[in-house]
Amino acid sequence: MTPAIYLTRLSMSDKLLRLFNGIRSDAGAAELDSIDDDAKLRDDLGFDSLELAVLAVKIEAEFGVDVFEQGIVLTVGELRGRINE
Amino acid sequence: MNLLLTGGSRGLGLQIAEHQLSLGHQVYVVSRNVTKELDSLLRKFPERACFIDCDLADTGQIKKRVFDDQIGKETPLHGLISNAATAYDDLLTNLQPEPLHSMFQTNVYAPMFLTKYVVRNMLLHEVAGSIVHISSISAHTGYKGLAMYAATKGAIESFSKNTAREWGSKGIRSNCVVAGFMETEMSSSLSNEQRDRIHKRTALKRPTSLVSVASTVEYLLSDGSQSVTGQNLFVDSGTI
């Protein structure tokens, strides 16, 4: 049986992927099939400061956490860590 | 439209609330208390007028009381009318830290935090909304006793201009209505002689009308002003 924690992680990944692709789509960028924890939000995913602000707002609505409240995060893994804190 | 209005219990704020409710909009009125006049407005428009009890001088409670508890994340906001303000009038040589601090909390910090959460709401709901700050002619002309108050309005005008620049690419606009002296409670402590002197400094030789300011706010919230942002619109009887 799949551990519950794994299901939660999958679910969070799916939600993050959906949010990332929504913002990329608005910017005319190709949608992603998956996301890697090591991926950098700016350099690898191509988000600029305003897109990161939109991402933060949508993450807060989805997960109830303001991920940039304690300062900027650089990677998907760090983002996931803030949501889990 | 869903609008958030501060300082709507009397004077200009009450006028703006009534104006926007009459146009059919939903108005969330933030105030410290419900005056008789606001109470009658809430009863007249029970479906569309919503009172939010919040003392804006306590900026730490704005997010919870206004946004989390009342507006919620499901309601898109289309406009903010930041009108609430207090006036600490005195000669500079009498300046005291506590009233200065309190005035800056209400007139500068609160509008900044309200704008923060309104812009976040607009981004969440992908709304190209409009932010309107009520400024004052005192920030531009100078009047004896108003140096501290005018400084808060100058700060808000700079804040508005930069907000417009920062969020324009998302369609969010920010403007100030620079109001002249109006016959409201805020100016009630002026003597008749002081009033006459102020009015003589205007082209129209009369106080600024509340209706004129409320109509300008309506324009800035509407699609008719879709190309107007980062501006200060003077509604001041033509102050010279």
Image: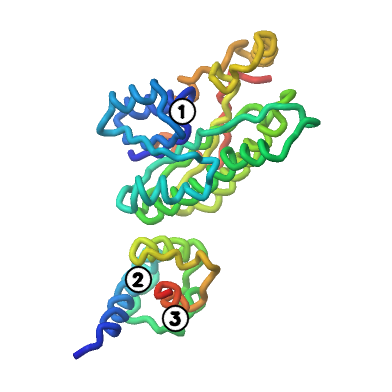
Q: CA distance from mark 2 to mark 3?
A: 17 Å
- Do badges 3 and 1 share one subunit? no
Could you classify mark 3 by the number of other residues whose Cα lies within 10 Å: few (under 14), some (14-19), or many (20 or more)? some
Q: Tag 1's secondary structure?
A: helix
Who's the residue at 55% across and 48% down the image? B163
Callout 2 secondary element: helix
Q: In which quadrant of the rendered view does residue A16 lie?
A: bottom left
Residue B221, disc: none
x 40%, y 84%: residue: A36
**Disc marking residue A21:** 2
Q: Is residue B239 above or below residue A64?
A: above
Q: Position of residue B137 (x, y in %)?
A: 63, 27
Question: Horizontal placement of A1 versus B75: left or right?
Answer: left
Marker disc for residue A77: 3
* Alpha carbons under labels 2 and 1: distance apart: 42 Å
Q: Which residue is mark 1?
A: B13
In the depicted structure, whether residue B159 falls above or below residue B144: below
Horizontal and vertical percent position of residue B21:
33, 28
Tag 1 subunit: B
Question: Foreground residue, B189 or B134?
Answer: B189
Q: Name the spot of residue A61 as percent of width and height, x first.
A: 35, 61
Q: Are marks 2 and 3 on the same chain?
A: yes
Query: For the N terminus of chain B, which image quadrant?
Result: top left
Name the residue located 46 percent from the left edge and 68 percent from the top edge. Answer: A67
